[in-house]
Image (cartoon, helix red, strand yellow):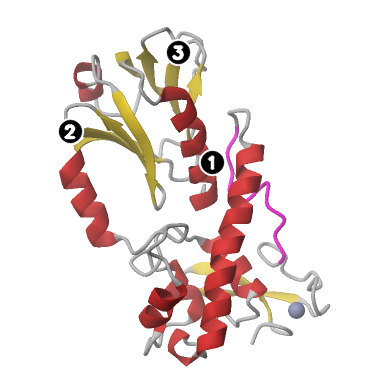
Amino acid sequence: MPELPEVEAVVRRLRDRITGARIQHAKVFRCAPAELVEALPGRRILAVERRAKHILIRLSGGLTLHTHLRMTGNLFAIPDARLHTERARVVIALQGGTGIVFEDSRALGRMTLRGTQELDNELAASLGPEPLGAEFSAEAFAAMARGSRQPAKLFLMDQRKVAGLGNIYVAEALFRARIDPRKAMGRLSRPRLAALHKEIVTVLQDAVESAWIAYGVPGRFSEGESFDCQVYGREGQPCTRCGKEIRRLPQGGRSTYFCAGCQR
Ligand SMILES: [Zn+2]
């Protein structure tokens, strides 16, 4: 599943190419609401934003085209709207002939048209602060952690605590901060929480960089493929820091990768 950095890379590239454009028409091929065909033409694209892993294309008339890529989705601009592949679920043609394509081989992602205000209220109610936003400060993070008995891994995966963090980058941030994923958040000292906060931000910034480079050409999309993981997916291999074997354990129904030698 694309995680926050991959979605951020998709959003930045789209933003450069489609902001300000007016929509000419839309074609819906499969698994997307037919209302797009009627409702999109004539609207101007005001902005392209990201909230957690949600892609928000702000349109004139108080509407937002809301896309979630889920497992295999991809959203990108093409120079000629007529020249899309047969994997396209939705093609939106823009004035001047360019286009936006929503591809999704497994059709698990979704694209819907929503009232901007209603959607923003919904997202605000279900999502915590953006880890790359100004509101995600070390102080706010420590305040959330105070008294929490949740294991660090599950705390960080909780979208109401920090929005958009997923399995890969949680594992990598905990490794960089040398924190055992099973450790209760409320039991981490203030300096260790500050270190974890810093590593969450830097691991995401690094991952946005590598995702930005990897998705320069639209194509196959997969999580963290461009990122040099130190623990994620490395079960049985030696830790790059202490040499002990990387372990995997189930937490909240997902695999957690960590080094029991240097994460405490
Ligand atoms: Zn280690």
Position of residue 62 relative to residue 130, above or below, is above
Q: According to the image, label 2 marks what residue? A: 62
Q: Residue at x 23, y 23 (%)?
A: 34
Q: Amino acid at mark 2?
A: Gly
Q: Amino acid at mark 1?
A: Ala
Mark 3 secondary-structure assignment:
loop
Q: Quadrant of ligand 1?
A: bottom right
Q: Residues within 10 Å of mark 2 (few under 14, many from 20)?
A: few
From this viewpoint, is residue 198 visible? yes
Q: Residue at x 63, y 31 (%)?
A: 216
Position of residue 77 relative to residue 235, above or below, is above
Left or right for 249, reference 21: right
Q: Quadrant of the C terminus?
A: bottom right
Q: Amino acid at mark 3?
A: Thr
Q: According to the image, label 3 marks what residue? A: 98
Q: Give the main secondary structure, helix, strand or loop, of the magenta stretch.
A: loop
In percent of width and height, residue 180 lies at 60, 83
Position of residue 91 relative to residue 240, above or below, is above
Determine which of the numbered discs, if any, sits on residue 220 in the image. Answer: none
In percent of width and height, residue 127 lies at 31, 60
